[in-house]
Image (cartoon, rainbow, N blue to C red):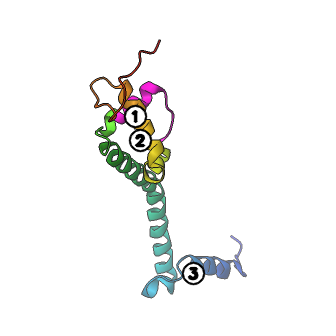
Amino acid sequence: MPRVKRGTVRRAKRQKLAKLTKGSFLNKSKLYRAMKEAADRAGRFAYRDRRRRKRDFRRLWIVRISAAARAHQLTYSQFIHGLKTLGVELDRKMLSDMAARDTAAFAELVGKVKRVIPGAPQPAGGAPPAAES
């Protein structure tokens, strides 16, 4: 088996790892093995949390939509069901943004949903829904 001379490869590998763990506490930014373990652990957390972030944001959007719908005497599930019935294809991110920033448009959407759902409280001062054919 021939002798392997590393040359600059070993140094480059170590520098790359040091760059990844820069700012870590104590030996995790100084000793090679500790740097390797810290970088590996950080990578696993990053991988897991990139997936978790998607769940967390969806949950946040649902909470916001639910709060805005309840302000108009509708539950979240009634509101989403009404949107599906109407054929509205806005995702939860867009609905959440609309509920927070454009309350007038959200209220209009809620009014349309209330007309479609049987037994839902009608918008205040609104005429009874006209029969659509």
Could you say which is closer to the camera, residue 85 or residue 1?
A: 85
**Quarter of the picture holding the N terminus:** bottom right
Q: Is residue 11 left or right of residue 44?
A: right
Callout 2 touching callout 1 (CB < 8 Å): yes
Q: Which residue is mark 3?
A: 18
The x, y position of residue 91, in whole percent, is 49, 40
**Within-10-Å neighbours for mark 1: few <14, some 14–19, many 20+:** some
Please report the bounds of the magenta region as a residue range: 79-91
Residue 130 figure quarter: top left
Q: Which residue is mark 1?
A: 111
Q: Nearer the viewer, mark 1 or mark 3?
A: 1
Q: CA distance from mark 2 to mark 1?
A: 6 Å
Q: CA distance from mark 1 to mark 3?
A: 58 Å
Task: Say what amino acid the circle numbered 2 marks.
Answer: Ala
Asked if the magenta segment contains residue 89, the reply would be yes
Task: Say what amino acid the circle numbered 3 marks.
Answer: Ala
The x, y position of residue 71, in whole percent, is 31, 46
